[in-house]
Image (cartoon, grey):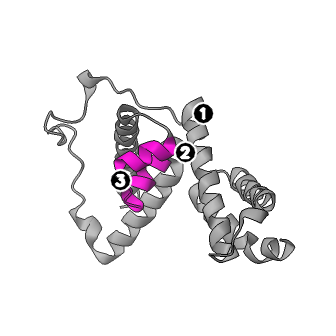
Amino acid sequence: MAGWVKSHTADLVRYARSRVKDPDVADDLVQLTFVSAWQTLKKFAGDSSPRTWLFAILKHKLADHYRKVYREGQQVSGMEIADDDPAISEFATNGHWTSTTKPADLSSAFELDEKERLDRALRHCLDLLPTNLRGAVEMKYLKEKDSEEIQQTLGISATNYWQQLHRAKLKLRSCIEGRLTRNA
């Protein structure tokens, strides 16, 4: 087991830190991964590599972490959650932006240099999202997970899931537009 710790800690920490904003929490999750592996070592049949097995355990620990964040309603980033009052909705009934809230013209954002700026802005703005919103967005759009699978992983209702995505998209849009217009 000591060899596994030495061989795989760096990769596990890097993976956890890419999924959890707080490096201390990521480090704790990696430690919990090794504790869990040590406690269940007798169940490891060797059908996969130790690395694969450790990453599977870590992924379960990350899912448990996100479930806990949602259940306890922890606000881990200090950012306020936007009001979801339908009277001030930025979307029409068909789901499209209203004419007054339509995003600024970002057509130049897809030129080579601008695409890089947009990518940097997106990464920066994703980092600013609270953990619960970021988790839902990453699973939906970056990992292309099914909605039901995301809801089950995070332990939330369908309504809460769609609210989280809605809030995250509004925050991302505002943040990205702000960064692109500031740095233009």
Label 2 vs label 3, nearer the camera: 3
Q: Is residue 150 magenta?
A: yes
Magenta region's main secondary structure? helix
- Residue 120 is left or right of residue 31, and the answer is left
Relative to residue 44, is residue 60 depicted above or below? Answer: above
In the rendering, at what x and y percent does residue 132 appear?
51, 42
Q: Do the residues labelled 2 and 3 touch (CB within 8 Å)?
A: no
Which residue carries the number 3 mark?
A: 146
Which quadrant would residue 75 be assigned to in this image? Answer: top right
In the rendering, at what x and y percent does residue 90 appear?
24, 34
- Which is more toward the observer, 114 or 23? 23
Relative to residue 58, is residue 78 depicted above or below? Answer: above
- Dot 2, crowdedness within 10 Å: few (<14), some or many (≥20)? many
The magenta-colored residue range is 134-154
Q: Which amino acid does label 1 sit on?
A: Gln
Give me the disc on residue 131.
2
Q: Residue at x 19, y 41 (%)?
A: 97
Which residue carries the number 1 mark?
A: 74
Give whichever of discs 1 and 3 has the lower sequence position.
1
- Residue 68 is left or right of residue 152, and the answer is right
Q: How far apart are marks 2 and 1 (CA)?
A: 9 Å
Q: What residue type is labelled 3?
A: Asp
Relative to residue 60, is residue 148 depicted above or below? Answer: above
Give whichever of discs 2 and 1 has the lower sequence position.
1
Q: Which residue is drawn at 47% across and 60% down?
A: 123
Task: Report whether residue 69 is seen.
Answer: yes
Q: Are marks 2 and 1 in contact (CB under 8 Å)?
A: yes
Q: Which residue is drawn at 15% across and 33% down?
A: 93
Q: What residue type is labelled 2?
A: Thr
Q: How far apart are marks 2 and 3 (CA)?
A: 19 Å
